[in-house]
Image (cartoon, helix red, strand yellow):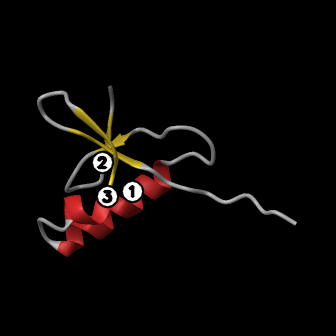
């Protein structure tokens, strides 16, 4: 029996418009305070749909960015 498995891939959109795909979230976000990491990771997981791509989430507050 196989159960569905949810796999999250993270991308980063920089201020200059560049997008980095499939980044290592820990390496990127632990440059600052670990508390920021927890807030943003929770926000990303809350707004991520079961299938498909979720919205951009801002760092360090975890707010959804409207395009």
Q: Earlier in the sequence, mark 2 or mark 3?
A: 3
**Mark 2, secondary structure of its residue:** loop
State the residue at coordinates (17%, 37%).
Answer: 14
Q: Quadrant of the N terminus?
A: bottom right
**Mark 1, secondary structure of its residue:** helix
What residue is shown with label 2?
63
| Labelled pair 2, 1 in contact (Cβ < 8 Å) | yes
Residue 61 left/right relative to 22: left
How far is the residue under mark 2 from the one under mark 1?
Answer: 7 Å
Residue 35 left/right relative to 22: left
State the residue at coordinates (67%, 60%).
Answer: 5
State the residue at coordinates (29%, 54%).
Answer: 62
Residue 5 left/right relative to 34: right
* Closer to us: 16 or 46: 16
What residue is shown with label 3?
24
Q: Residue furthest right?
A: 1
Q: Residue furthest bottom?
A: 34
Q: Residues within 10 Å of mark 2 (few under 14, many from 20)?
A: some
The x and y percentages for residue 15 are 13, 34
Numbered circle sitting on residue 17: none
Residue 44 left/right relative to 3: left
What residue is shown with label 1?
43
State the residue at coordinates (73%, 58%).
Answer: 4
């Amino acid at each position: 029996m196989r159960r569905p498995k949810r796999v999250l891939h993270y991308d980063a959109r920089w201020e200059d418009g560049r997008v980095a795909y499939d980044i290592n979230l820990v390496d990127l976000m632990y440059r600052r305070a670990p508390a920021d990491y927890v807030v943003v990771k929770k926000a990303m997981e809350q707004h991520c749909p079961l299938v498909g791509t979720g919205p951009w989430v801002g760092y360090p507050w975890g707010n959804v960015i409207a395009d």
